Amino acid sequence: MKTIIPVARDIKSLRKRIVRWRGQGLKTALVPTMGALHDGHLSLVDAVHKKADRVVASIYINPTQFAAGEDLSTYPRDEAGDLKKLKSHKTNLAYVPDNTEMYPDGFSTTVSVSGPANAGLEDKHRPHFFDGVATIVAKLLIQARCDIAIFGEKDYQQLLVITHMARDLNIPTQIYGGETIREIDGLAMSSRNMYLSDKEREIAPSLHKVLQDTAEKLRAGKVPKTVLASAKRTLTKTGFKTDYVEARNAETLAHLTPGKDEPVRLLAAAHLGKTRLIDNIAV
Ligand code: PAF
């Protein structure tokens, strides 16, 4: 395939470029992705362009964060399209390793995370997920050794898990969160949105709408237990099968302490047919 931006397919060529940039005194940024890029990913590229001189985007569908029966085999793949999009957002290098580069024979180490990874949100419904994410992100951060890396706030629990993991393991890459980019009707952009049927796509923005209404009620001082139960009922009536709608401490994801003035994040996950959607907003 004719590549349109430089592509590193192994750790050695990735490092060679980054070491050269560092030697030139340039600040580097990493944008880890699983490909099937949309405007949400590209906004992360744009955001780190403002903080760094050179931007590397990785594209790797990490098998260890998928459980058996999840969508690993059908996860959308479009390397040529992704490279074009990265080029149009002035990405300096794409890092596209394969499974043998990332998990060579004999690979036997897992990063095991707790703290925000045990909040009873995504972890409750995808118990394998965060150790898989932490393992691959630790590898990517160590392989690239960029000054900064960015992850979307749409995966809010993931962002906190990665921030804690990098801090706990003294990985000297500064972690940033990038704001959630939405379709015009409010649906948070996600590579998995392409699984939605036309009918489901019409219903999908209700998830964000319910979060907005719920946040409004929480801000007005209504009892969290009552408004969260009502949010779940509304989602069920609209056609969702809800995994959770929860209001948590925005920094730790701990349950809220009644009467305490603390930053609050409202998080939800719900199935629409075969597609599982997640979203979150600040309260
Ligand atoms: O959010 C994602 O796309 C993935 O979980 C990540 C962070 C690239 C790790 O595979």
Image (cartoon, helix red, strand yellow):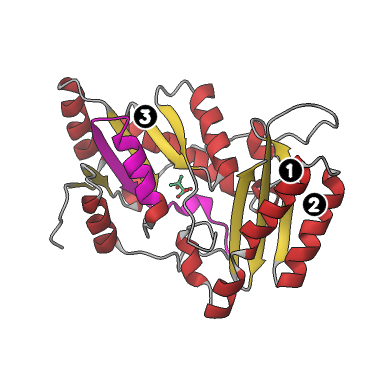
Pointers 3 and 1 in contact (C-beta within 8 Å): no
In the image as oriented, which residue stretches furthest toward the front? 220
In the picture, the disc for residue 247 is 1
Q: Which residue sits at x=27%, y=38%?
A: 55
Pointers 1 and 2 in contact (C-beta within 8 Å): yes
Pointers 3 and 2 in contact (C-beta within 8 Å): no
The residue labelled by disc 3 is 148
Total label count? 3
What x and y, as percent, mark residue 85?
27, 56
Q: Residue 242 versus residue 213: which sits nearer the camera?
A: 213
Inspect this view and state whether residue 108 appears.
no
The residue labelled by disc 2 is 228
Identify the secondary structure beneath mark 1.
strand
First to last magenta residue range = 41-68
What x and y, as percent, mark residue 219?
74, 41
Mark toward the start of the polypeptide (3 vs 2): 3
Identify the secondary structure beneath mark 2.
helix
Q: Which residue sits at x=18%, y=32%?
A: 16
Q: Which residue sits at x=52%, y=79%?
A: 198
